[in-house]
Image: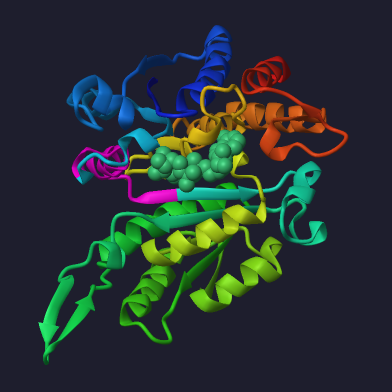
Amino acid sequence: MKIAVLPGDGIGPEIVAQAVKVLDVLKSDGAKIEMETAAIGGAGYDAAGDPLPEATLKLAREADAVLLGAVGGPQYDTLDRPLRPERGLLRIRKELNLFANLRPALLYPELASASSLKPEVVSGLDLMIVRELTGDVYFGQPRGIEIRNGERVGFNTMLYSESEVRRVAHVAFGIAMKRGKKLCSVEKANVLECSELWKEVMIEVSKDYPEVELSHMYVDNAAMQLIRAPKQFDTMVTGNIFGDILSDAASMLSGSIGMLPSASLDENNKGMYEPIHGSAPDISGKNLANPLATILSVAMMYRYTFADLATADRIEGAVKKVIAQGLRTGDIWTEGTQKVSCSEMGDAVVKAL
Ligand code: NAD
């Protein structure tokens, strides 16, 4: 398996270095993996004048999976928009046709006090949100701002084709099969025709997955239920805009941005794996960042692209172990636990592996 390693900017290189240590251990244990590093984001701009250099895109296309750190930094904020680091990220997602975004919200019981919700509401939370990533009102045509009846109007088009809903439905049902076999489809079918179609297609696809219990929820209720009783959910599937909002809300249930990985998959389960956080310029270069979200992204790579569940479990088990040992980077540190640096955390995971 070939992995394209794209560290990016800010803390990206520091956290990716820890994930690479984990991959090196797996390699020395016999895993047939090859890694090749390339520049993206601000680093891509610095190296080749492009946030997604041609050579990086070529490497990503040829690879089986992509491991990404983070992009962006204040030094790039004044560049023309097409040259900004974030554009490189959007482009690579589009070029690789990564239409299914998987965002787990997981809370280790030992970190329950880091959440802004009561520990009993969130402790042990293990939820997966599958968000459609390349359609919906973010991409639908027509869109624009124009003059109508003497005043400006802004408009966008919420649009899903059957095939777009069907392909993300298959991903979500497949994931629910590997988890608790419960899938909640979130839409607004009481008001939107687009959601009505979404719901119909979900019901059609559910016939292929008789073991999965499918339920439906309106997005306004889902927002409330996520905060009221998040542990009722196992796997959720939703469109681009609803998923954008709900997955950010869900990530805060765990209270620790440095702990949450993500995956974006194409039709063949090729994927890009990255922590949900950004490049954290405020702590970059200080060996302070939490590398666990990036290491857990490697676990997701094993689960979803390499279909090697035993190795995924092994990596997640090692992370659980270091948390149980009381090791904490600054973002998750509380009184009575041991503060460690980014590289010390990486070393501890390697030892636990
Ligand atoms: P951020 O996620 O980088 O940082 C928010 C806060 O969380 C900061 O205080 C930071 O120190 C902390 N934090 C983030 N990750 C951490 C980690 N692993 N360990 C410990 N603390 C961590 O978001 P921001 O400050 O809004 O954005 C900074 C830059 O990152 C911007 O240029 C933005 O465009 C970019 N960004 C990139 C991505 C991405 O690459 N996927 C995502 C979001 C933001």
Q: Position of residue 43 (x, y in %)?
A: 32, 25
Q: Residue at x 85, y 38 (%)?
A: 335
Query: In this figure, which colouring scheme has been used for the structure?
Result: rainbow
Q: Residue furthest right?
A: 336
Q: Quadrant of residue 164?
A: bottom left
Q: Is residue 83 magenta?
A: yes
Q: Position of residue 301 (x, y in %)?
A: 48, 32
| Residue 129 in sight in this render | yes
Marks counted in the figure total 0
Q: Quadrant of residue 257?
A: top right
Q: Residue at x 25, y 20 (%)?
A: 47
| Residue 211 in sight in this render | no
As drawn, 1 above or below 179:
above
Q: Which corner quadrant holds the C terminus?
A: top right
Q: Position of residue 329 (x, y in %)?
A: 69, 30
Q: Which corner quadrant holds the N terminus?
A: top left
- 183 or 316: which is nearer to us? 316
Q: Position of residue 2 (x, y in %)?
A: 37, 20
Looking at the rendering, the stretch of residues picked out in magenta corresponds to 82-101
Q: Residue at x 22, y 76 (%)?
A: 155
Q: Quadrant of residue 190?
A: bottom left
As drawn, 182 above or below 53:
below
Q: Is residue 131 magenta?
A: no
Left or right of 142, for residue 261? right
Q: Residue furthest bottom?
A: 149
Left or right of 11, for residue 321? right
Q: Main secondary structure of the magenta part?
A: helix
- 19 or 207: which is nearer to us? 19
- 66 or 304: which is nearer to us? 66
